[in-house]
Each structure stands twice: as structure tokens, then as C-alpha cells.
Image (cartoon, helix red, strand yellow):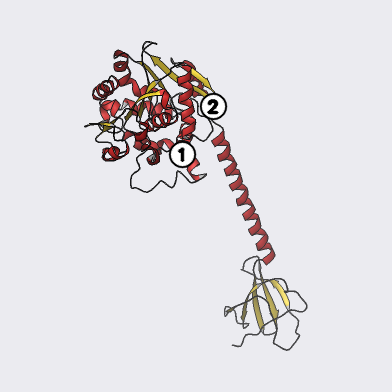
Amino acid sequence: MNPDTVAPPGNWLAHRAYSVTIAAPKKGAYLNQRSRHLKTNAGDNAPVAVKQAEGCCSDSKQIYRPGLTTHIMQLSHPVGWLSMKHKSLSLLLIIIVAFMAFLAFDYYTEDTTAFEAAQKTAPQPFLALDLGSTRYQVLGSEGSPTVVLIHSFNGYLESWSPNIDALVDAGYRVVTYDLWGRGLSDRPRVDLDLEVFRNQLKALIEHLDSDQVHLVGASFGCVIASDFALHYPARVGKLVLVGPSGWPGKGKKNWLINTPVLGDLAFHYYGMNILQPTVENYLYQKEPHYWAVEAWQKFASYPGFTRSALSTLRHAPVIDYSDSWGKLGPLGKPTLFIWGVEDVSFPYLNTRKIPALIPHAEIVGIEGAAHWVNIEKPAQVNKAMISFLQQ
């Protein structure tokens, strides 16, 4: 069979695309053929009749002419298809913008009702500063030498509970406080760099009207204590650094921390899940000391904690304080390192670096304890601290 190509008079098909089936009049014998436009090579101008095809879709038509049946399936109009595509893209864009607006609203709108209630019922006093309120505690005689305890990155005032009484009994006035974003201290929306924590400590010491203090830090608190001693050496007597952070390992840096937006959203919605395994690894023997993890969970559940944690990781040398450890050597302040031998956060092997950086420093390793060595082995830590401070 030799199929003809049909073109109706005028521009009837000029702006539409068709699927064309041309067949002999014999019913059921069809030959499929596709074309964007119908043209004629028949050489005659025989009239063409068009009617709706029976038994076919609603957008189908048949063309009749002598000796020929042509079945045409109309395709979508190109302009209509583009219009539909643009509408879909616009709808998708609207959804994305609305979703981002919701995330921004949720991120910047924190329900602080429970947090403020906890602050109001806290037995400790609060010191009002420019960036907010700092919860602190002072125990011991006012005329006694002052020891300021600075908790860890994931710590809080109560994490020093196993150590306070021993220091007070040894004749010291003991001061503990919550770092910005931790415990029940406020969570200011600023870059939590080392200067911010230094100024917080300085304001607290000035409030206590202490000319000179001994600083005891745990983990990131060691970095804050060392930084304060470097900036205000006359105000610091001795340094006790318990399980210090700031000793980088060989592992790769966490890309999520420094990724804008993605990192913020990850910590906003999943920050506690991200940090909890790290906190649990602070303990070598978890069962008898899990109260410390549970207390962390309580304080970390308040709005602003994960935001503050991420800000500190981004702007303060929590992981790497290498450039400044060596400055403690020339400073000459009496320095004691107390380190849990089982520490996996900042391994005990880092003590090998200390003699070259701080030749006069003393080092005490405590077995059976990890990063929160002051919680797991308080008797040994207290004995080492008090012995050192009384020298």
C-alpha cells in the first residue's frame, strides 16, 4: 500500500502537531505514521471531510477523502505545554520560598517559657551582663583564696559537684558558673568566640572583687582559663587543666559545622542527637555516672543550646588551640594537667607534647577515666588539685 499525505486547504493545521495514521479503506488495516504537519503530494484538491473518530479518544479526528482514511491524533500545543511548565516551576518556587520562610521563623523564634521558668526557680544567683544573665555559685569563706571552676564545652555548673566540697573543706572559696549558652545562663545570638567567654569570666571575677584567682578548667574550660591567663596574667595565680580540649587529632574536620544554613538547620533540629554520643563518650564507666549525661540532656533541651554549641565550634578554638599552648611556657604560671588515660575525645597521648610546650607543667594521668575525669575519679582529681594549689 502506498500511503498518501494529506493537507487540508488553508492553514487549518498550521499551528498544531499531529499523530497521523493513514490506511486503505479496509477496516482495521492501519499504518502508523507521525508528522508535525500534514503536507500533500497527491496533486489533487479533492475535498477533505473531518469528523470525530468513533471509539477513539476525544482529541482524535478522522479525515475522509476518496479512497483514503487518515486518522489524526492531536498533540499538545507547544505554547500550552510551556505555559504549564512555567506554572509548575512557579508553584515549586512558591513552595520552596514558603518552606524556607517557615524554617527561618522556626529558627529565630524560640519558645523560652520553660527556660525562663527554670531560671526563676534556680537556687543560684544570676549576674546581669551586657549579653544576658550568667548563673553562678559561690561557696566557702569570703576571705579564703578563690578558685574559679570553668566547666567543659558540654558542661554546666553542676558538673563540678563531685569536686566543690573537697575544695571548700581545704580552705578555698569556690566559684562555679554556666558558660554562655550552657546550663541556665542566657543564650545570646552572637558569635561565641574566645573573647566573649573571656569577657564573661572577667566580669564574674570583677563582680567577686577578687584581685587574684586560681583557675581550674575542664575540657574547653581549660582553653578559656589559659586564654584568660595570657590576657590578664596578674589576675591568675595557678592553672589546673583537667582533660583539656584544643589538641587536634589527625581526623578530617567536620564539614557540616562550617557549612552555612545546612549546619545551622542540622544543629537546630538534630543537635542533641549529634552531640549526645560525644557526651556519653566523656565517661569511661557510664552506669555509675550517667547522672551527668542526664543533666546535660535537661540543659541541652532548652532552646538556644544547640545554636550556642554550633556557634562555639565555629568561632572558638574548641578543637585546635595549638597556636596558644606554647605561650603558656614563657608565661611561667604554675600549671597542672590532669588527664583521664581512657580519654577518647582528646587522647592522653597528647601529654607527650606538653614538655616541649610548657616545660614547667606537671602532668597527672588517671586510669579508668575518660574526658570527664573529675566526675569519674573525683577523689584522685581532688587530691591532685588540692596538693598542687597548696604548694
Q: How many marks?
A: 2
Quarter holding the C terminus is: top left
147 sits left or right of 342 in the view: right
Q: Nearer the viewer, residue 287 or 172?
A: 172
Q: Position of residue 25 (x, y in %)?
A: 63, 82
Judge whether residue 342 can be spotted in this image. yes
Q: Position of residue 23 (x, y in %)?
A: 61, 81
Judge whether residue 118 can be spotted in this image. no
Q: Which residue is mark 1?
A: 267
Looking at the rendered structure, the secondary structure element under dot 2 is loop
Task: Say the numbered circle drawn on residue 131.
Answer: 2
Residue type indicated by callout 1: Phe
Looking at the rendered structure, the secondary structure element under dot 1 is helix
Q: Is residue 14 above or below residue 26?
A: above
Q: Is residue 297 above or below residue 121?
A: below
Q: Nearer the viewer, residue 126 or 77?
A: 126
Q: Position of residue 161 (x, y in %)?
A: 33, 20
